[in-house]
Image: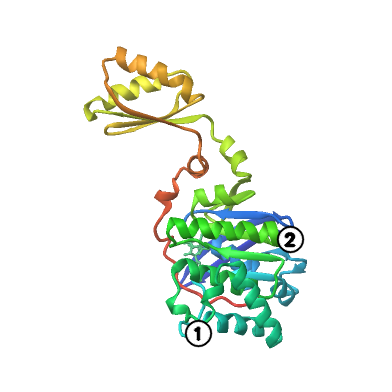
Amino acid sequence: MITARGLARRFSARGRTVNAVRGVDLDVAEGELVGFLGPNGAGKTTTLRMLTTLLRPTAGTATVAGHDLLRDPLGVRTRIGYVAQGGGTHPECTVGEELELQGRLYGLGRAEALRRGAELTDRLDLADLDARPTKTLSGGQRRRLDIALGLIHQPALVFLDEPTTGLDPQSRANLWEHIRRLRAEHGVTVFLTTHYLDEADALCDRILVIDHGRIVAGGSPDSLKAQVSGDGMTVDVAREHTTAAMDVAGRLPGAHEVAAEPGTVRLRVPRGDQALPELLRALDAAGVPMLAVQVHRPTLDDVFLTLTGRTLRDAEGPGPEAPEESGHAA
Ligand SMILES: Nc1ncnc2c1ncn2[C@@H]1O[C@H](COP(=O)(O)OP(=O)(O)OP(=O)(O)O)[C@@H](O)[C@H]1O
């Protein structure tokens, strides 16, 4: 459904050059639900905008939904849906009007646009909101409307840019269910970007991790987690015992990535369940009272840390300063 080779995009403005995407290869099969994961400024949106014809690549080639991205951008556009981060609804228009207008923009007749709109509002739990101005919708309802608008022309492939950013946990879980159903019941291929590891973990068959404009890892959530060697342990002690606890922890068989901050020691061990009693005995023998301990299986957070040396939290915040440049359809 998507094949991209060496896709790259450079922005230049005011004498500065930003290599936002530095040569991305992608293969997405029909019916896959793929997550594109990375911190702020990693190049997710830029890649998405290239794949959806909104931004011309500086290098590389791609075929999207059976059409060549550079030679046949119109062909690409008719077969894909793109749900951008901010959405684009008019605040005074009603849900029904927005859907009808979008359908007409895609060349549907009025009756067909209304029929599709009704089908989508039904499918996305918006059926009672037809007459409501979009400005009165909740965050979750608005995101579901954005998705309905992206699906009006029955695309085979839909791109969702951070679909759940800003939503409360319940609305996120609800939206995940709708995204799963898009694929399960309608065979739509879904390519989504997200900051959230739990989202990628819960939703995606496959995850691609992008950092500094390059894909640094890819695979199923489980296979990525398997790349992290061992379980994590977090040990809390009184601040004055931090160094002693770190020494003890570092001597456990197979202990690695041992790090400490005042009152807390973190490490990785091959098997957390086996290391725990040993750690308790060793701390006891060293006269270090332990206040609390946690053992956890590797998470995608750990994967990200292992691959990039940063946690997604470290990476939060604005990306490198870069001036705006308006995008051009290819
Ligand atoms: N129009 C532009 N002009 C100049 N630089 C840009 C432009 N668009 C993006 N960039 C820069 O390219 C890099 C990648 O940005 P991009 O928006 O693709 O990242 P992202 O992974 O989607 O981040 P976020 O999660 O914050 O949306 C950043 O350094 C950004 O500042």
Q: Residue 62's x, y, as percent?
A: 71, 64
Q: Residues within 10 Å of mark 2 (few under 14, many from 20)?
A: some
Q: Quadrant of the N terminus?
A: bottom right
Q: Count up the numbered dots.
A: 2
In this view, 229 is above or below 21: above
Image quarter for residue 158? Answer: bottom right
> x, y (%) of residue 218?
62, 47
Q: How far apart are the alpha carbons under marks 1 and 2? A: 34 Å
* Outermost residue, right side: 66
Residue lying at 27% horizontally and 34% vertically, measured from the top left: 262
Local crowd at mark 1 within 10 Å, few (<14), some, or many (≥20)?
A: some
User: Which is more N-terminal, label 2 or label 1?
Assistant: 2
Task: Give the quadrant of residue 71.
Answer: bottom right
Q: Identify residue for label 1.
A: 93
Task: In the rendered view, tell whether residue 206 sits above or below residue 62.
Answer: above
> Which mark, residue 1?
2
- Distance from mark 2 CB to nearest ligand 1 atom below 8 Å: no
The amino acid pointed to by label 2 is Met
Image x and y of residue 287, in percent: 26, 15
Q: Is 264 left or right of 27, judged from the image as shown?
A: left
Q: Position of residue 152 (x, y in %)?
A: 65, 75
